Each structure stands twice: as C-alpha cells, then as structure tokens.
Image (tube, rainbow, N blue to C red):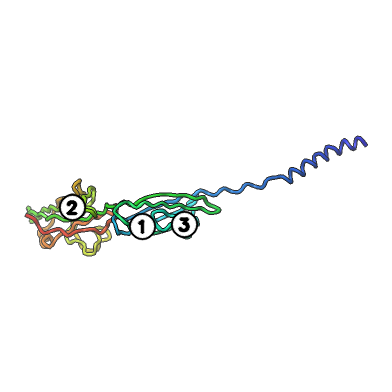
Amino acid sequence: MRLLQRLLLPLAVALGLIVPLAATSLPAAATDPRPTTLKLSLSYGDHVGETFYVNVVVRGPDNEPVTGDVVFTGITDGTPVALSPAGVINLNGVASSNAPVAVTATYLGNAEYAGSSASGETKPLRTPYLTGEPTIAKVGPMLTLTLTMSAHAKNFVGAPLAGVPVVFTLFGPANSVPPGPAQKDPSIEVCRAVTDAEGLATCKGSGLLGSLLSILTGGWAAWDDGTLQSIGHHTKLPVIGQ
C-alpha cells in the first residue's frame, strides 16, 4: 500500500502543476503594425494667386500601397483625406502670397500599418519671365549672318534670375511650346545661354542671309528647361539693333 502511495504521489503532484499552468497560459502576442513611408511633393505656386499642387504617396515596407486617411496642414481645413486604392492623394491650392507655402501630410495608419509623416514647401518667385534685347546681325563671308541675341530673365516681382537656361531661335514657336521634341513648329535654333547674376543671357550664332526677314519680324527667346517648372515662358525679340 505504501509502495502504491509512493508511486501515485509524484503523479498527482505533476497533474496538479499541469492544470494551473494550462489555465494561466498567456495568449499569443498581437502583431505590431507594419512601418510605412510617406512621400510628399509640391510643385508650382510661384506667386500669389497661382495654383500649387500637392502629391502624397504612402507605401508599406514592401512598397505596397496602403489604405487609410491623411491629415494635412497648410492646405485643406484639416479634415482627413482618404488615400486612393493606389495609396495616393492629389490636391491643389492657391498661393495666398509670394511667400513659400508650407505643407505637412500625416498618415494616420490603420490596424495593419503604422502612421508616417512628411513636410515640404513651395519654392516661389523662381519662374523666369523673359524680356528680349534687340538682335544684332553682322553679314560675313559667303552671305552668312553672325547673330548676337540677348534676353533678361526676371521673376514675378521683377528681380533678376540667375542660372536660367535660354534658347534663341528663328521662326519662334507660335503655340507656347519651347523648341525641342514637343515643338512641331519649324523653329531654327541659333544658340543657347544661361543667365548671369544680372539675369542676362546672351550668345552668338550663325544663320543664312535668307533668314533676315524672319529676324526683322522678330526671333524668339524661350526658356527650354523644365527644371524650374516654367515650360512655355518666352518672349519675342525686338528687331535688329545697329
């Protein structure tokens, strides 16, 4: 009998320990929200009254689009804006002054994804407005022309802009599209230059004497680079100067 008790006692103790452990076992830990990346970009908004554009893209850790709401400061009234199924939001606003417009976008997250945020601002008074100087032409051997073309670039408030790429052409574009792949008009490029600290771009090129009529009716100075968000700004050059 005592032998049987000795055999059963350890078994009873073991069973007694197992039951409480099973009763107090903890549930599996909840999965942490996955991290996200919010990319914010702003374009245009050069001066008071001009429209600027805001683009937001929110992605998960595997570059997958996410859903949920984004709250903005600097644009909208603070009401959350829902991401599209592609994880994108596009908004536009109007610059209230010539100062930069600061925008912050905050993704609020959801049950699966954590929130994220980014900030940026518009870059005003960088759009170049061109004013042409008289073209100077000299007739050389073989009836060729040496042309000197010049233009000033200023911003919306009249301050000179340095570093603006300008292309000078004959038969200037008639549809506000600068010379290049998108230009279907038969413009003839004479030369290119970049504005200096005073906002002046000037360069020389050669043309046929047969182009004189085009010069007398005015060449064109057109900004031809999209880096300053101003494709299409151009000016007609005055007639030949002596």
Q: Earlier in the sequence, mark 2 or mark 3?
A: 3
Decide: few, some or many residues near mark 3? Use Cα within 10 Å; few <14, some 14-19, many ≥20. some
Q: CA distance from mark 1 to mark 2?
A: 28 Å
Disc 2 from disc 3: Cα separation: 43 Å
* Rendered residue at 34%/57% (across/down): 52
Residue under pointer 2: 152
Q: Which label belongs to residue 53?
A: 1
Determine the residue located farthest toward the right in the rendered image.
Answer: 1
Residue to which mark 3 is pinned: 87
Residue at figure coordinates x 85%, y 37% from the top left = 9
Q: Earlier in the sequence, mark 3 or mark 1?
A: 1
Q: Position of residue 31 (x, y in %)?
A: 59, 48
Q: 10 Å neighbourhood of mark 2: few (<14), some, or many (≥20)?
A: many
On the image, the x and y values in percent for residue 122 come to 33, 52
Name the secondary structure under disc 2: strand
Residue type highlighted by circle 3: Gly
In front of the other: 43 or 227: 43
| Mark 1 neighbour density, 10 Å: few (under 14) some (14–19) many (20 or more) | some
